[in-house]
């Protein structure tokens, strides 16, 4: 509900701003036209109202999409599945980590199986600073990373260049 109100507020301000700027632009054109000699090289081109509205709506849609992407979208999360006493999660590395958040239980061994599909050099390595792990990831190969979390908390991991991030949530 808060998202919808926020988007409505942005749309309202944008429409008011667009109307105000088109009115002031029209007034400025009239003022300069009265005092300036006409030149055939530069002429004002009147745009249809439908085109102005379409451009405004398109711009607002792009702004809304960016706001949603950066403020409201949540990274994908997954609970680890336990088999033979080991918690396992498969993580796809393709322009980031999917899932980006993994929830595990404290005190049980964890095996994260990284499948790197992205050939960029940034994602060649995954770093777990809290667990003192730096693991190279081969392209199109599943690489396991194993550790046992002893303390409840949120532990970050990242690519070798610290551009892409993920997290391990350790629960009781």
Image: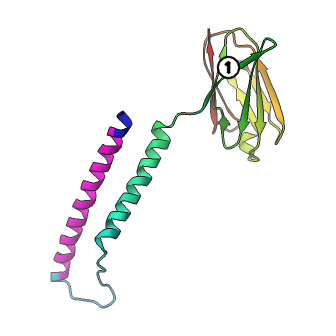
In this view, 108 is above or below 80: above
Residue 29 located left or right of residue 137: left
User: Where does the N terminus fall, quadrant-wise?
Assistant: top left
Identify the residue at horizontal 66%, vertical 35% (top origin).
98
Q: Quadrant of residue 58?
A: bottom left
Tell me which secondary structure the magenta stretch mostly adopts.
Answer: helix
Identify the residue at horizontal 36%, vertical 39% (top origin).
4
Point out the stretch of residues depicted in magenta: 5-33
Residue 26 located left or right of residue 137: left
Counting other residues with Cα less than 10 Å from the Cα at mark 1, is it few (<14), some (14-19), or many (20 or more)? few
Residue 49 located left or right of residue 130: left
Element at badge 1? helix
Residue 104 located left or right of residue 14: right
Q: Position of residue 51 (x, y in %)?
A: 35, 69
Q: Position of residue 65 (x, y in %)?
A: 46, 48
Farthest residue in the bottom direction?
40
In this view, 44 is above or below 162: below
Asked if the stretch drawn in magenta spans residue 26, the answer is: yes
Q: According to the image, label 1 marks what residue?
A: 130
Asked if the stretch drawn in magenta spans residue 34, the answer is: no
Identify the residue at horizontal 45%, vertical 38% (top origin).
71
Q: Position of residue 48 (x, y in %)?
A: 30, 74
């Amino acid at each position: 509900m808060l998202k919808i109100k926020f988007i409505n507020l942005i749309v309202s301000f944008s429409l008011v701003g667009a109307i105000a700027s088109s009115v002031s632009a029209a007034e400025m054109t009239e003022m300069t036209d009265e005092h300036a000699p006409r030149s055939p090289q530069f002429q004002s081109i009147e745009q249809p109202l439908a085109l102005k509205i379409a451009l405004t709506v398109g711009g607002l849609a792009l702004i809304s999409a960016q706001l949603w992407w950066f403020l409201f979208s949540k990274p994908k999360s997954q609970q680890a599945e336990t088999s033979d006493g080991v918690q396992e999660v498969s993580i796809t590395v393709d322009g980031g980590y999917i899932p980006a958040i993994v929830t595990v239980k404290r005190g049980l061994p964890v095996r994260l199986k990284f499948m790197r599909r992205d050939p960029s050099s940034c994602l060649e390595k995954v770093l777990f600073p809290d667990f003192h792990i730096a693991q190279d990831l081969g392209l199109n190969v599943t690489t396991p990373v194993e550790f046992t979390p002893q303390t409840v908390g949120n532990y970050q991991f990242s690519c070798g260049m610290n551009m892409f991030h993920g997290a391990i949530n350790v629960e009781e």
